[in-house]
Image: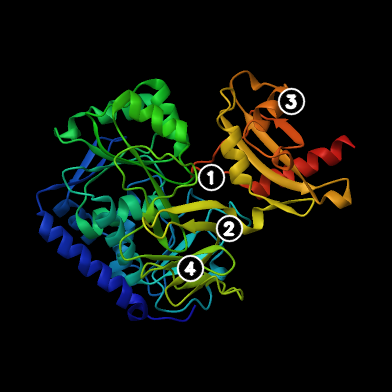
Amino acid sequence: MAETENARSGGGGDLYAAWKSARDAAGADSWALSDLKTGRHWTFGDIQATVDSLAPCDSGDIRFPVGYSVDLVFETLRAWRDGALLCPVESEGSEPDATVFEGLPDETVHVKITSGSTGRPRLVRFLGPDLAADARKIVATMGLRSEWPNLGVISMAHSYGFSSLVLPLLLHGIPLAWLGDPLPGAVGAALTGSLKQGTGWTLPAVPAMWRAWLVAGVLSGDDLRLAISAGAPLPLELGHAVFDSTGMKIHNFLGSSECGGIAYDRSAVPRTSAESAGSAMEETSLVVNAEGCLEVHSPSVAAGYWPPEPEGAIGDGVFYTSDLAEIDPDSGEVKLQGRRDDLINVAGRKVSPVRVESALAKHPEIACVLVFGVPSADAARGDDIVAVYTGVGQTGDEEKLRRFAAETLAAHEIPRHWWPCPEVAPDARGKLSRTRWRERFLRERQGRT
């Protein structure tokens, strides 16, 4: 890859200058970072001293810090300092082949790897101003503050963790206590531990974590000042259950690897609609285009995919999503209605899997459910609806589930195939892939025929 050290230093250099400003504003002796696994602590001055001790990166170097280690914080600053390219990864050995980065535009400072929940993983490239804008949006919209340090349990490698934990620390002086362990016992001990400093925590997490913590009884309104959930829509019943038992509101956060923050539920009480994703983040304008899909206009939108893709989903500060949505003209509330590509064609009628999932999730025995379409044996019908689910008792009583679904769904919206499977659960990012579960269902169905 032909480039010079100075070629990338514009964006990275600006970010490094912003770090020094945040460091000075916070104070060199102020607590900045802790690794709760090892018991190590760093002030802002300590972080700078550690970075100063790191050897310079070679010109054109690509750094692949792992998302579950505080080393990522120091590697980020070293990359910014030396004009290297940063590409955080989930684990050692999961780095993309270096040849993938050949020809990458010189001004690129950061590459994110998407989750692949809607298909194959992609590389998304960012400039320095894109990352800085995302950090500004998150801090301003969510009201992050230094006296409410972040408790880190989600991977810092993917977009949600990097934007919510790393960037607020390095660009806005929001301290971070890195735990990296979502087990209830560890989280409960951290919430009430000595670092709390009598102020409470900000805790970004995913719905599966919030459910586990609620069941374990480790949540308390005295320990948390700001609770955030992303990665997947927060189930209504979970948000209400946490609020009823602790008085704490979990704020639903919608974001994407391609543009960072999109929408945020700013209200003080739980949502009343499962489709609600809140309203636009600061510095963000949302519109629904002629295809019914959400468009995100923001300075935090990425520079593009890498390698470039012809469909033009990202360009000139706009991310063209495939999320079907409605926006209330008065309140600005965004309601998501599934993805355009996920719509199920049942005898010519379009069915939203999100609507079906929302109805089935209210069944007391269903803990997790995913809905998708597969080709029907009856060509005139188009698609059949499949519901893969897990829950207490792993009920296989299809007729009981059909009757329950019929209480709120139209006849053509009721799943034809019911698949109890204890393995269906969100991944570490809080996501469920319709593509992968559809492929698995088709493979297993073919094996049975």
Q: Disc 1 versus disc 2: distance between alpha carbons?
A: 13 Å
Q: Foreground mark, 4 or 2?
A: 4
Under mark 4, the amino acid is Phe
Q: Residue at x 42, y 79 (%)?
A: 106
Q: Is residue 73 above or below residue 394?
A: below
Which of marks 2 and 1 precedes in the sequence? 2
- Mark 1 or 4: in front is 4
| Residue 268, percent from left and from top | 29, 40
Please state if 48 lies on the left or on the right of 325 as rendered: left
Amino acid type assigned to the residue bearing label 3 in the image: Glu
Residue with the mark numbered 2: 121
Which residue is labeled 3 in the image?
398
Q: Residues within 10 Å of mark 1 (few under 14, many from 20)?
A: many
Give the structural element (helix, strand or loop) at label 1.
loop
C-alpha distance separating marks 2 and 3: 35 Å
Specify whether residue 180 is in view.
yes
Distance, label 3 to label 4, CA atoms, is 41 Å
Q: Residues within 10 Å of mark 4 (few under 14, many from 20)?
A: many
Quarter residue 172 falls in:
bottom left
Q: Which residue is mark 4?
A: 319
- 1 or 3: mark nearer the eye: 3
* Kind of element beneath mark 3: helix
Q: Which numbered disc, 1 or 3, marks the residue that appears first in the sequence?
A: 3
201 or 110: which is nearer to us?
201
The residue that mark 1 highlights is 431
Quadrant of the rendered image containing residue 209: top left
The answer to whether residue 378 is left or right of residue 168 is right
